[in-house]
Amino acid sequence: MLMRRRNLVIANWKMNPESLEEAKRVFNSTKKTVSLIKNTDIVVCPPFPFLYPLSKSKLSKNIFLGVQNIAAETKGALTGEVSAEMVKNSGVDFSIVGHSERRAMGETDKLINKKLQTAFSAGITPILCIGEKERDKEATYLEFIKNQIKECLSSLQKKYLVGLVLAYEPIWAIGKSYKEAMNPTDVHEMVLFIKKVVGELFGKDIAGSLRILYGAAVEAENTALLFEHGNIDGLLVGHASLTSQFGDILKAVPK
């Protein structure tokens, strides 16, 4: 009998909150909710200054720490950069890579590819973000997504691609209410397309092991439907992960 794959929910705090005290409050609230949830792993990605203090907190077996970004290089005279090895030694297991907001700052697929290689080499599990800025009637955005996947994963060793975590975040839907964003059926179609692309590029075994998360206008009201009809393995949650709504989202994830 095959065991059901565990759900994965990523909490991306972005550049929030302003104080350590507030960070601890939000983290403790999340931990309390997580302790009641089964079959779901939660990764909290706070800003770098809060990592060490939060890592000293007692964690249940299904909650992990992650970072929102890592350097493409392993070391060097790189003011302001933080390496994958540094965060790994701080108790971090995951890193978001290629988030749309980082791409808006100038990150390219080539740079993201290098960050993926650096993460894997350090024993960090990257969450690769992809997504289109807009949709058109000619569906050229599908070719855009295909090229993102191809360029970001180019030259990576096959052993790293097994069980790859990929977060699909349609940029045009970010900030909208769930009623205005993608419906679960459309999400399902994108999941199938992404798996098809990965299968064509890297083989059916890699596509079959792929874990696809969804991130854009995720709310408690559409969480269950996204899992049931969207065929997703998890969620990437932004601002809502800092609010009381995050607990409701986690409780809505299928058991």
Image: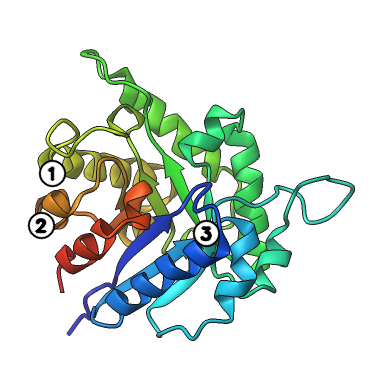
User: Which of pointers 2 and 3 lies earlier in the amino acid sequence?
Assistant: 3
Which tag is nearer the camera, tag 1 or tag 3?
Answer: 3
| Callout 2–callout 3 Cβ contact below 8 Å | no
The secondary structure type at the circle numbered 2 is helix
Residue at 22% across / 44% down in the picture?
Answer: 192
Residue at 29% across / 43% down in the picture?
Answer: 196
User: Which of pointers 2 and 1 lies earlier in the amino acid sequence?
Assistant: 1
* Mark 3 Cα shell of 10 Å, populated few (<14), some (14-19), many (≥20): many
230 in relation to 54, above or below: above
Residue type of the residue flagged with mark 2? Glu
Which tag is nearer the camera, tag 2 or tag 3?
Answer: 3
The secondary structure type at the circle numbered 1 is helix
The answer to whether residue 176 is left or right of residue 99 is left
| Callout 1–callout 3 Cβ contact below 8 Å | no
Report x, y in % for residue 208.
31, 59
Which residue in the structure is indicated by mark 3?
46
Which residue in the structure is indicated by mark 1?
184
Residue at 60% across / 67% down in the picture?
Answer: 51
